[in-house]
Amino acid sequence: MLARKLFFYILPPLVLACIGGGIYWRIRANKAPVDEPVPPPIVQPTASGELESQVVGQPATTTATQENATAVGQSASTVNQDAPKEQSLARALTSEELLAKASTFSDSPFWAKLLAQTTPAMRLVKAIDAIANGERPLDPLDFLRVETSFSAQRNAEGTWVATAESYARYQTAVDFVDSLDPQKVAEWFEMAEPVLQQCCKKLGYQDKNIRQLLTEAFNTILTTPKFDFDPQLVPTGTDGIYHFADPVFEQLNDAQKLLVRLGPANCAKLQAKCSDIADALHLYK
């Protein structure tokens, strides 16, 4: 009797609760929750390399994050495309490549000797530096030293002048410079400029570039007085050492005096070639 009463009193509420719960969960399943977070955008690369945003289950909208991602992707794509071109244009030639190009300038024994020396680029810059400072480039061009000393003789008027042998002591170097193609030299100099500039800095020039140094060297050469005669000499009593009788020559610096001692013809050749090379490099413009 008691069991029947419990059955009739408890069973109806349980049935109603089950039916109500089923209806509640069915309604909730068909309705999107208000506080459910929006799925984050999924960024995928496209075939072009740019970044494109796709939102799963949501309309395609642009957010600040998506715009930044796209901008970064475009920048990366641009850098990757342009970097090889910039690197190829900016690549400096190696010393070996510069030597190979320089060797085609001339088959002069002087040039072959210079290129065969250790650190030829530094020797070249040191020679330019010496001339720019009015000094004779004896140390960087030590391989050019000759055994015969400067000599003089009396001419028909009885004055002392240099001998033909004295004028010809450095004929090999003069002939080499005279044979140069100014345009080829200018093109090579522009290719070699980074290497030569490093040598310039190693000499202690931090605020002067190699073009300025070369311009100063050319100034030394081009401001040497032009002459078409054998300058008169004055013996000093020491073998191989003479002074110039003309004060215009005697007051010149050591580099300019060396040019004069090469004789009028050789001095004119060097000045003309330096002028042409300076024009090709636009040093005075």
Image: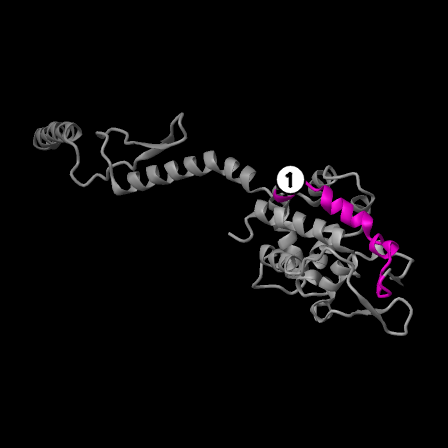
Q: Residue at 67% x, 40% y: name it.
A: 181
- The number of callouts visible is 1
Q: Is residue 269 left or right of residue 9?
A: right
Name which residue type carries label 1: Lys
Residue drawn at 64 percent across, 42 percent down = 182
Give residue 122's quadrant in the image: bottom right
Using the image as rendered, state which of residue 74 and residue 211 is in the foreground.
Answer: 211
Q: Is residue 39 part of the magenta span, yes or no?
A: no
Figure check: 34 above or below 196 = above
Instruction: Provide the residue span drawn in magenta.
Output: 157-186
Q: Residue 39: percent from the left, percent from the top? A: 27, 36
Whether residue 167 sits left or right of residue 190 in the image: it is: right
Pointer 1 residue? 184
Which quadrant of the structure image shows residue 11?
top left
Tag 1 secondary structure: helix
- In the rendered structure, the answer to whether residue 67 lies left or right of residue 138 reads left
Relative image position of residue 229 (x, y in whole percent): 75, 57
Residue 238 % position (x, y): 90, 72
* Quadrant in which residue 72 is drawn: top left
Residue 177 falls inside the magenta stretch: yes
Q: What is the magenta segment's predominant secondary structure?
A: helix
The x, y position of residue 233, in whole percent, is: 81, 67
* Left or right position of 203 against 27: right
